[in-house]
């Protein structure tokens, strides 16, 4: 395999962002600490986190313990919907948990605000539900208002760039057409893998100068792609793992890829970049026709138009 140095992409702020980052979703604190430590030791300089992952303290501790200069690591965290009305407070709390003075990228995690009315313990890092079990969405608050407040965070120096996550073309269009919106998101982090290529959305973001970040690039723990004979055949050709093939399919499309793992072996393996032949990219592009299209991350946001 012809590995080479991980490339960077340019945000619309002019800052560089490494094309491969470590995802930390669903990583308990100690596992998150170890995963970030393994990743930094392996050469990763891009760590993707979020307040709702509830492991920011462990991520920050691993960053400090690594003794790598802060400016050498690109750190992302995300605003959770329970704090959509007060992103400044949410950011301050995330920075306190991380033990950092700033983050390189602060994302609106979902274009959905959540109500805290029925949360008895005041914990904002939760998914509030109504008495009937449905998620308690705040219909009186619009994500455009959250974005306007996030724009003010750029003046504080505590975020270097702001962006969004799980935004569709329609939601981005609404943002751009709204009064008071002066900042184009630096990034849009969305689920992308061969079963969900999101080509139209990716192309739209590129035209708008928005860097796309792919989460769940392998699908998920229930993904069938890693065991697909065609993917395995391509992996054998490159003396690679199926996961590496799927990751490099994403890299070949020109966006950031955020594989998540807590295994040291997998973390190291996922970091290798190599060029796929065009014929193999085309075979991977054909996965939806063979295996079916599938979105693996589908939270229930009720009637809110998240994926349209």
Image (cartoon, rainbow, N blue to C red):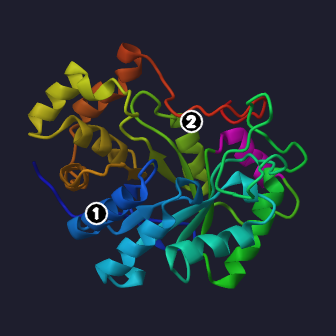
Pick whichever of labels 1 and 2 is earlier in the sequence: 1
Q: Residue 190: percent from the left, percent from the top?
A: 54, 44
User: Dot 2 lies on which element?
Assistant: helix
Q: Residue at x 53, y 43 (%)?
A: 202
Q: Residue at x 91, y 47 (%)?
A: 140
Q: Residue at x 69, y 58 (%)?
A: 123
Is 296 displayed left or right of 129 in the figure? left
Q: Residue at x 74, y 46 (%)?
A: 112
Q: Residues within 10 Å of mark 2 (few under 14, many from 20)?
A: few
**Location of mark 2 (residue):** 200
How many numbered tags mark residues here?
2
Q: Residue 58: percent from the left, percent from the top?
A: 43, 67
Q: Is residue 198 above or below residue 66?
A: above
Residue lying at the far front of the rendered structure: 121
Determine the main secondary structure of the stretch shown in magenta.
helix
**Location of mark 1 (residue):** 39
Q: Are marks 1 and 2 in contact (CB under 8 Å)?
A: no
């Amino acid at each position: 395999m012809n590995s080479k140095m991980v490339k960077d992409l340019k945000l619309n702020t002019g800052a560089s962002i490494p094309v491969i980052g470590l995802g930390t979703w669903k990583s308990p604190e100690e596992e998150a600490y170890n995963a970030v430590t393994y990743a930094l030791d392996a050469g990763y300089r891009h760590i993707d986190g979020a307040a709702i992952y509830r492991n920011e303290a462990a991520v920050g501790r691993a960053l400090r313990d690594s003794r790598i200069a802060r400016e050498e690591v690109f750190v992302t965290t995300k605003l959770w919907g329970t704090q959509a009305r007060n992103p400044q407070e949410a950011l301050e709390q995330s920075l306190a948990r991380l033990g950092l003075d700033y983050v390189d990228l602060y994302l609106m995690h979902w274009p959905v605000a959540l109500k805290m009315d029925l949360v008895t313990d005041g914990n904002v890092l939760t998914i509030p539900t109504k008495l009937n079990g449905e998620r308690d969405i705040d219909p009186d608050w619009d994500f455009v208002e959250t974005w306007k407040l996030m724009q003010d965070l750029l003046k504080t120096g505590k975020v270097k760039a702001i962006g969004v996550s799980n935004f569709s073309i329609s939601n981005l269009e609404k943002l751009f057409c709204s009064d008071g919106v002066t900042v184009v998101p630096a990034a849009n982090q969305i689920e992308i893998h061969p079963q969900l290529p999101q080509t139209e959305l990716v192309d739209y973001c590129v035209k708008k100068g928005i860097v796309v970040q792919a989460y769940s690039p392998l699908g998920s723990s229930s993904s069938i792609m890693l065991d697909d004979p065609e993917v395995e055949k391509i992996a054998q050709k490159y003396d690679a793992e199926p996961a590496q093939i799927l990751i490099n399919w994403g890299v070949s499309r020109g966006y950031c890829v955020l594989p998540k793992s807590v295994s040291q072996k997998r973390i190291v393996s996922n970091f290798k970049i190599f060029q796929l032949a065009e014929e193999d990219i085309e075979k991977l592009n054909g996965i939806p026709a063979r295996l079916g299209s599938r979105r693996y991350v589908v939270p229930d946001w009720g009637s809110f138009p998240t994926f349209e």
